[in-house]
Amino acid sequence: MLRPAYRWRLPDPREIPEEAVALGRSLGLSERQVLLLAARGQGVETLAGWVGPAEGGLHDPALLPDAGIVVERVALARRRGERVLVFGDFDADGLTGLAVLSEALGDLGLEVEVHVPSRVADGHGLSRRAVEEAAARRCSLIFTVDCGTASGEEIAFAAGRGTDVIVTDHHHVPPELPPAVAVVNPQRPDSIYPDRHISGAGVAFKVAQLLLAATEAGASGGNSGHTRALELAELAAIGTVADVAPLVGENRAIVRLGLDRLRGRPRPGIAALLARAGVTPESVDVETLGYIVAPRLNAVGRLGDATVAARLLLTRDHEEAARLADELEAANSERRTLLGSALDEARAWLAAAALPGEEAIVTAVGPWSPGIIGLIAGRLAEEHGRPAVVVSTDVSPWRASARSAGGFDLALAFQACADLLERHGGHRDAAGCTLAPEAWEPFRRRLAGLAAALGPLDRLPTLSIDLVLPAAEVDYRLLRELAVLEPTGPGNSPPLVAITGLEVTRARLANGGHSQLTLRKGLEVLDAIAFDRPDIAPLLAVGDRLDVVARLASRSFGGYESLQLEVRDVAPGGAPPWAGLPASASAVVHGPVA
């Protein structure tokens, strides 16, 4: 029987103030666009900023915690001619942030060394090995990127060797700050920075903006410090999307700036990576960064030495960029193969295990590479609708990675288990730790208890619908109007439209586990694809009336453009869930669109 697989959250009926409509009209917005933006929290005070130049969405970097200390310490380093080590985490957020700060510090005339830790040998955070390497390279100042807030012992070790550390990070802040010269983290309780949700690369970008603006000495090529800082947004945009940061506020501004740069004149490494993946620069969007660029930057660190990815981001040589892009492409292919087999093993482990507390969390333990356990955890959390923790027994001590679901705060949960862990860190939706084998079962039980204390999680996913429209109103004009929400992503999800009154003219299963549909609206037909929904096509017959929730897209084939529906869910036509369909009476929630 055909029924919705999701809860359909409909937008609340709302009246838009005439003042907002008039302002929207002056900005070139239709009334429907004003309505869409109002549902996303954009009113009279913020409309102009939303559609205005991206640069206007950037905050003053001087508001960052310890901003003044950073400026003074870097000025001292310049006077002394000090060498600086930039230590960046091994994921795409840390790597792009490392490239941002390395180039900014180099533009200021400092001699910069870079260090990317090994995911397997070092794990997350600053390590003693990196501190010793800094000393060996005669670096008296270390900048951390996308890490360091939880590295108090290692920073104290560095101080004991006469090496100063400046932390730039965005992860959960422990009760006691590390003994660094400066801790630039907008998550600090005493922070007055307007946006607490920027990524690690975003924090690095803001520090670069702070330092370059403070000197106005400019950068290579004669650009002003301000202009040069904005150029670095192409890197910060990749890190922001890769870290799944909410695309609102300053994150949205950074990504808009970065996309403009990437579509026009991407740096050699990114250009080579795009070419290797068959993507033209002018077509780059958020999905390109999230599904093409970021996985390739991450893959090499998951399997080996992430320094290769750092070199790709930093190189100005096109031939070297092409060689490095080939290495990243090969690593990504290998990563896909390893992940597939590891996922099968993890699912089999879950099917065979019957552990107390598994109704609240999902756990799997096995000899998998530490580089892919986060990916496994993410997939299991998605499949089971509850937090997932995956442990690698392939290293000593054991390594665990977790991904959240249902609003469970992993950073706070891991902090509550700190006495059982050797090291830990992360944020609300993703966290990791190292622990002794004998600590695993107590840790698992305590984590399960914390998750269970929140009560039962709602495992039926929700689709937040922006508009409900009859099929006749679905056209290219609507697609253009929906584009006002771009760039979309977490926190600003791609707009979904509930479309009523469609008729099925064709339904078949497509390769890869998808349902391919042809739907009639009046005298016209629309092509539709339901990705990862093989359950839909067998339930449909020619002539069936259908209501769908879909994302609109434009697809090019054979030189022709056509409108396509990317279907997320379906319901029998004429009796949509909001009309009280008995089989899915609980599948509708009325409320504001987030």
Image (cartoon, rainbow, N blue to C red):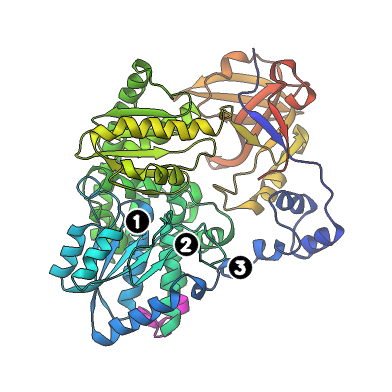
Q: Is residue 235 left or right of residue 42?
A: left
Mark 2 = which residue? Answer: 188
Badge 1 density bin: few <14, some 14–19, many ≥20, Cα 10 Å: many
Q: Distance between the residues labelled 3 and 2?
A: 29 Å
Towards the viewer: 331 or 156: 156
Towards the viewer: 221 or 203: 203
Q: Is residue 432 left or right of residue 506?
A: left
Quadrant of the image containing the N terminus: top right
Mark 3 = which residue? Answer: 53
Q: Distance between the residues labelled 3 and 1?
A: 36 Å
- Residue 454 location in percent, x, y? 55, 34
- Residue 103 location in percent, x, y? 33, 71
- Residue at the (77%, 28%) spot, across then down: 522
Query: Is 156 rendered above or below residue 331?
Result: below
Towards the viewer: 320 or 103: 103
Residue 223 colored in magenta in the image = yes
Provide the residue span drawn in magenta. Answer: 216-227
Q: Residue furthest left?
A: 136
**Kind of element beneath mark 2:** loop
Quadrant of the image containing the C terminus: top right
- Residue at the (66%, 62%) spot, across then down: 51
Q: In this view, does 135 lie to the left or right of 312?
A: left
Question: What type is the residue that disc 1 sits on?
Answer: Ala
Q: Distance between the residues labelled 1 and 2?
A: 12 Å
Residue contact at pointers 1 and 2, CB within 8 angstroms:
no
Which label was assigned to residue 150?
Answer: 1
Query: Is 87 rendered above or below residue 583?
Result: below
